[in-house]
Amino acid sequence: MAYDYRPFPYAPPPGLTAPEPRHPVLIVGAGPIGLAMALELANHGVRSVVVDDNDVVSVGSRAICWSKRSLEIFARLGIAERCLEKGVTWKVGRTFHRDREVFNFDLLPEDGHRMPAFINLQQYYVEQYLAEAAIAHPLIDLRFKNRVTALSQSDHVRAEIGTPDGPYRLEAEYLLACDGARSPIRGLMGLDFKGELFEERFLIADIEMEADFPPERHFWFEPTFHPGQSALLHKQPDNIYRIDLQLGWDADPEAERQPDRVIPRIERVVGHSDFRLDWVSVYTFQCRRLDQFVHDRVIFVGDSAHVVSPFGARGGNGGMQDVDNLGWKLAAVLAGGPETLLESYDRERQHGADENIANSTRATRFMTPEDGAERVFRDAVLRLAGKAAFARAWVNSGRLSRPCTYPGLGPDADLPVGAAPGMVAPDAPVAEGWLQDQLRGWTLLAFNHDAPDVGLPVLHPTGDNARARYQGDAANALYLIRPDQVVAARWITATAAEVTTALSHHKEGRPWP
Ligand SMILES: O=C(O)CCc1cccc(O)c1
């Protein structure tokens, strides 16, 4: 079943006939990041205009693996249920060398989490669900077939926008560039990425076939069906399977896209010819980023700010973590809060991007080692991994996306390692449902601790999972949680004055000294 691409309606924008009042936020790009950004800002009461030069969701399945953290964010944006219902849930990965399984992992072995480790769902479905939620939202003005052609900034941003009915001007307090890896906004501002380009080509083929392949990630080094290279297989909804095949740098991208080249390759992977090609692409990858994500009133979010190879699924998921981080900070700045909060977005998300780039680069080098020591090491690890457990830790087919731990948050106390300052506050089942559903602004979580009165809501979560994840063996515990559900600080016990000090520090977006 091929996805039914239906154009979203275009309407002539009001700016064509009369100047529009200045908008708080102009979001450029109605892909998953731009739409999620608009919904996240709307959750914080902020209006936005979203412009996109296109009027359909992205062509081809593109990003397909959505992490637990992205699903937790989608829950706040109102699309998680649809994604879970449609998506293929998985948590197990298996890595093979030739025909032998050398390594497997379970990304979420414990119970007591609402969201699974991952779902596979074509990007066009995620965009469709986000676009429908955005169209229905009174704080979001979504404008298709609107293209930013010029831009300048002073104490606000001015954009020239082209439409099928001619150009108009739009002013906004801030512009968020969510316009993807090829970001035209980056181009208009003369900015470029820094980092590594890999001399390797991969074929992505999405095929439709009836199969009882398990909902797992399978990765092969040097499989017999694709000698000397690597391959990856993922199951998606609608009987669609994603197959990534390493081709080598010498491969001719145009020729490799042609069905007469692709079909025999896929036949060798699946062992038959009973499939339909749904989407094919040939790509090279980069692990690169902008030096800075915040350029005065223009802020880069997602792939416009940083790009990684697909292995590890850190592109779309890393972008969602940008959205998570920026939403509450920009809302606070627009409400009169300090602009240092935007510096903290820049600092924290550069840290997140660097972690994603480092992981992605390591995996890429393991898959495409340079001749000499790198290849000798890689081949030795693969040969040993089937026999010796110690070598398995070095097998790297991509470490799958997890949110980073932001440094410099605190204070910290000797409490469970999985809920340290800078980490996402772990979810847990509680009497009222799920803990994260109740973390929708600055919140205190108190365990066997009197609630210090600092003007914040205080929760006393019950249940074994919550206690184990937050209190552990300690007699008491108190946590300060940010609006993006990140642990800002924690104590065994704290006074109201100590909590107020930490809170004011974090509300200014400063790292803990
Ligand atoms: O399993 C992985 O490491 C990621 C799979 C993936 C994600 C996005 C595109 C793609 O071709 C593969």
Image (spheres, helix red, strand yellow):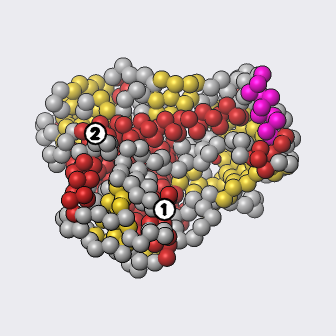
Which amino acid lies under the numbered mark 2 shown in the image of this protein?
Leu
Q: Residue at x 57, y 70 (%)?
A: 111
Residue at 54% across, 30% down: 287
Whether residue 141 is visible to the viewer of this picture, yes or no, is: no
Label 1, secondary structure: give it: loop
Q: How many numbered tags mark residues here?
A: 2
Residue 376 seen from this side: yes
Quadrant where the C terminus is found in the figure: top left
Residue 70 horizontal/vertical position (percent): 47, 54
Q: Residue at x 64, y 43 (%)?
A: 398
Q: What crowding class fits label 1: few (fewer than 14 Cα within 10 Å), some (14-19), or many (20 or more)? A: some
Q: Which mark is residue 133?
A: none
- Which is nearer the eye, 497 or 3? 497
The answer for how far apart the CA atoms under marks 1 and 2 are is: 30 Å
Residue 158 falls left or right of residue 193: left
Kind of element beneath mark 2: helix
The region drawn magenta spans 372-382
Q: Amino acid at mark 1?
A: Pro
Q: Is residue 141 above or below residue 254?
A: below
Q: Earlier in the sequence, mark 1 or mark 2?
A: 2
Q: Is residue 378 magenta?
A: yes
Q: Position of residue 221 (x, y in %)?
A: 78, 40
Residue 323 position, x and y percent, is 38, 47
* Mark 1 or 2: the one toward you: 1
Location of the N terminus by quadrant is: bottom right
Compared to residue 503, the image places residue 169 above or below, namely above
Residue that label 1 marks: 416
Looking at the rendered structure, which numbered label has been put on residue 342?
Answer: 2
In the depicted view, which residue is nearer to us: 257 or 152?
152
Q: In which quadrant of this rendering is ligand 1 seen?
A: top right
Relative placement, left or right, of 369 versus 193 is right
